[in-house]
Image (cartoon, grey):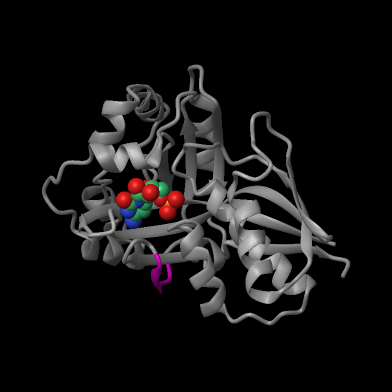
Amino acid sequence: MITLRANAKINLSLDVLGKRKDGYHELDMVMQSVSLFDTVTVAQAHGIRVSMDVPGVDEQRNTAYTAAKAFCEITGCDGASIAVQKRIPSEAGLGGSSADAAAVLIGLNHLYQTNLSDETLSAIGVKIGADVPFALTGGTVRAGGIGEKLRPFTLGKPLHFVIVKPHAGVSTPQAFAAFKKASPIRMDSVQYALTAGDLSLYHKYADNALGMAALSLSPDIMRAADALKKAGARKAMMSGSGSAMFAVFASARQASEAAARVSGDFEHVGAYACAETGVQIMEDEA
Ligand code: C5P
């Protein structure tokens, strides 16, 4: 049995470059793993079983199941018994289901000692979800393609975050369907600002091209943004296709003080730090 920590991500900035013939969108993003995580336990079994500690999750229609099925088909392995302790809110743009899938792939690769390469895991992962390749790697990354082309870089200074998720979520396909092209985001400047550790410059250039589309689907996003600004955030940013909003702070203390000042009725409010990986093995009893 193996226990893994599956970290959430935020999009420090996200631009949509265009639509591909297969319906997916070409993106240019800066992605960051954060210290909000699901705990995923994977054990060898005959057949695939998935249990989650949240109501309403179909045992077979979730990314943990899909990941295990794809892994077993490719490697010929018997199956897996998977338990997920969910902390990352769903329909939030925080990559929770991608993180779970990545943890299952890494967990099974360890348990069955199949030694699939990072490239193979990524190729399996991208078919499960566009954010899975990032979730397999994690850290701080400039991502292109549909999210699978990853160029890691190093932050000039560590960052801290407050994440606020309204009760209403946003469906990713609906957000992309509602997307209308606006002016391009200066992603090179965002990456430069983060590399230089210049938060003022980061706040000047960072944006999320899916913001207006998500807002049209879930007006509660504005309440989360207002709550963050009232709590002392310089700028409220949306992660992925929403509905989670976040703000960036220079220290853990600033972030935890701001999180304590967030008032209003939200599904999730918390202060987090950067995580260096997408998935971390916590316990390996294999
Ligand atoms: O791959 P994932 O399951 O995360 O994507 C969900 C949906 O979001 C896709 O079916 C597609 O409609 C949209 N999407 C997109 N372009 C991306 C990622 C997702 O259009 N790069």
Note whether 187 is above or below 204 in the view shown: below
Q: Residue furthest right?
A: 285
Using the image as rendered, state which of residue 204 and residue 94 is in the foreground.
94
Determine the residue located farthest toward the left in the rendered image.
183
| Residue 22 inside the magenta-drawn segment | no
Instruction: Give the image location of residue 55, x and y in percent.
Output: 68, 29
Image spot of residue 185 (x, y percent): 18, 54
**Residue shown at 39% from the left, 31% from the top:** 232
The reply, left or right, for residue 1 in relation to residue 88 is: right
277 vs 91, nearest the viewer:
91
Q: Position of residue 204 (x, y in %)?
A: 22, 49
Q: Quadrant of residue 180?
A: top left
**Considering the image in quadrants, where does the C terminus appear?**
bottom right
Residue found 66% across the figure and 47% down from its top: 38
Whether residue 235 is visible here, answered yes or no, is no
Residue that appears at 77% across and 62% down? 79
Image side of residue 12 versus residue 279, left or right: left
Q: Which residues are magenta?
A: 148-156
> Picture quarter containing residue 31?
bottom left
Q: Residue at x 60, y 46 (%)?
A: 62
Residue 48 higher or lower than 234, as above or below: below
